Image (cartoon, rainbow, N blue to C red):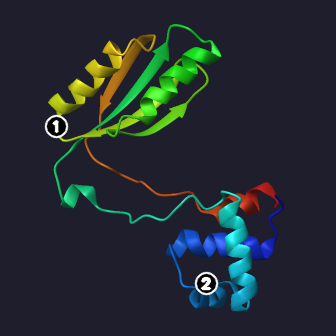
Amino acid sequence: MTIDAADMRILCALQQHGQLSKIKLSELVNLSPTPCWIRFNRLKEAGLIRGYHADISLDKIVNVSKVIVTISLKGHQKSAFERFEAYIEQVDEIIECIATGGGMDYVLKVVAPSLSAFQQVVEELLSAELGIERYMTYISTRDIKSTQPKLACLMAESGN
């Protein structure tokens, strides 16, 4: 799918403001409402807009344990990765999972109500026989920065 400057303005406006009305979006991106909405729907149908969410200050609501976990699998066959990733998708406490190259295969961000609840998540991971060779945990002591990358900056850097 080719993305032009008007599409970029729509995506940037949505990233900055979240879900917008047809009129407000068209005003922000300087397009008339109907063409703007047609473009918006095309971007959404193409899967470029995955959804909308509120950035909730979790620490002001509930005390939780945040843990970063690095994992290395025993086997590096496609089926081993697929089995592990399918399992991870089902665990609510695992809020992020990225595959990495180098020493570890995955980095997980886990949020649980307590360290004992986190330990239960780890024990279930190990019991599921996912081929985990080793893992390391890092307890988060405080959040310094957590943001989404600014699409406009990324696109400017790539020359698009």
Question: Which residue corresponds to mark 1?
Answer: 114
- Comparing labels 1 and 2, the label whose residue is closer to the camera: 2
Horizontal arrangement in the rendering, residue 146 relative to residue 47 (left or right) = left
- Residue at image coords 20%, 61%: 60
User: Is residue 30 among what the camera can see?
Assistant: no
Q: Earlier in the sequence, mark 1 or mark 2?
A: 2
Please state, as top left, top right, bottom left or bottom right, where the C terminus lies in the image: bottom right
Callout 1–callout 2 Cβ contact below 8 Å: no
Work out whether 21 lies above or below 66. Answer: below
Residue 127 image offset from top left, x and y in percent: 31, 13
Please state, as top left, top right, bottom left or bottom right, where the N terminus lies in the image: bottom right
- Disc 2 marks which amino acid? Leu
- Please name whichever residue, 83 or 123, is drawn nearer the observer in this view of the structure: 83
- Residue at image coords 51%, 28%: 85
Residue 125 image offset from top left, x and y in percent: 34, 20
Res 66 quadrant in image: top left
- Please name whichever residue, 114 or 87, is drawn nearer the observer in this view of the structure: 87
Res 43 quadrant in image: bottom right
Residue 25 - label: 2
Work out whether 120 lies above or below 89. Answer: above
Horizontal arrangement in the rendering, residue 68 relative to residue 23 (left or right) = left
